[in-house]
Image: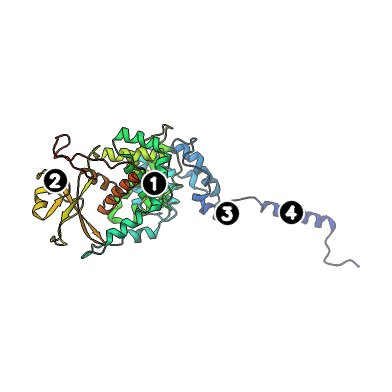
Amino acid sequence: MRSPFLLPLPLMLLLTLVFALLTLSGCSSSPSKKAASSGARIFPDLKLSSPQATSFAGVRQASFSAIDDAGAADDAGAASRPAGSSVARGDFAGRADVDRFVARMESKGLDRAQVVRTLERAEHDPWIIQYMEKQWRPASGPTGAWTRYRSRHITPAMLDKGSAFWTRYARTLDQASRKYGVPPEYIVAIIGIETRWGGFMGTHRIIDALATLAFDYPRRADYFQDELAQYLLMAEDQGFDPLQPEGSFAGAMGLGQFMPSSWHNYAVDFDGDGRRDLWDPEDAIGSVARYFNAHGWQPGAAVVARASGGAGLPWSTDTGFKTNYSVANLKAKGIQPAVALPDQRQVSLLRLDAAGGLEYWVGFENFYVITRYNNSTYYAMTVHQLAQALRSRRGLKQPTLRMTDQPGSGASAAPAG
């Protein structure tokens, strides 16, 4: 007996064919939203030293095309946005200040749509804001802070690594020293304190750090918007993907931790390969030397000298690299430099809060130059002492430097650091 639920055979074949066609039409491949949302990290093999992309347009072909392909399903209209498009998604979407920044970059010749896509993939980093908001308060009295600070940076392991770096790049260091007048030990010391000679160059995406500070840190927004602009121009000039590099929480980059504006102003192509690459040790060496030279380093001049006395000085006495005293003024306060100096010579008065008691030093022009790298007396003194320790480690004698009232004026001579 035929069941009433059985369909005629021709009708059954027709329904089977229709069902098969519908199934096939639903299997077409499309990138997932997860892939699209992680577009900033989907091309880790793109290297900073890659020569194939030499302009922002080249980066667009090498990098942004990958992003567009991965995010096609989620952002189908992004590639066809009009020239007046704004940042429409991500942590910095829908903001007038961000849109003004985009317009600014377009006026400098960058492709507006690509700047928009870069900022749409930048991420706000709340940790950076929290760190920047930490308030430093000066101590109300001696605490031994200098001894603790120094001990973190000048250790046997640091001297071993620094000496090894010096040996490996001795020729480059010698060339940079001759060209810019900066002793090799100071170049090595700066790179060591900044990044352990390339061992630690930071873990924050630079685009995230700069965008966070540019748009979410009002106190210094103008400065960091300028740095973000310089960074995007740097990416265009050097042909790398701006979403890739990592650096410090403030956007500093490479072995010498240059900010983007410092790259534009002071970085050099010291190995002659046509690129100013902050991640290349030879370019970093030349760039640090040029930075010091451009900020007024005086070849052959002293950096600091110890001073005796000062036991009766109150803690409130103005000290630091920004101070300016005549030697005669310091002598009247009971401070006697350990080198012979004319009474009219202007110096800074430096106080180090050492565990064994306060140390007083006088700083010269070259000490101030070191502070142009980092505005800290302790930082500059650590650079100086690490430099001298590295020099001693290599068996080099400490130079006897001529201390004069003015460069080349021929006053009294005495050893100083």
Left or right side of 124 for 351: left
Instruction: Look at label 2 and name its amino acid.
Output: Gln
Residue 382 in sight from this viewpoint:
yes
Mark in the foreground, 3 or 2 = 2
Q: Quick one: quadrant of the N terminus?
A: bottom right
Q: Which residue is mark 2?
A: 346
Q: Which residue is mark 1?
A: 162
Mark in the foreground, 1 or 2 = 1
Mark in the foreground, 1 or 4 = 1
Q: Which residue is mark 3?
A: 32
- Tag 1 and tag 2, C-beta contact below 8 Å: no
Q: Which residue is mark 4?
A: 20
Instruction: Look at label 3 and name its amino acid.
Output: Ser
The correct choice, above or below, for 135 with respect to 322 in the image is below
Per the image, label 4 sits on a secondary structure element best described as helix
Per the image, label 1 sits on a secondary structure element best described as helix
Measuring from the top left, give residue 386's x and y in whole percent: 32, 49
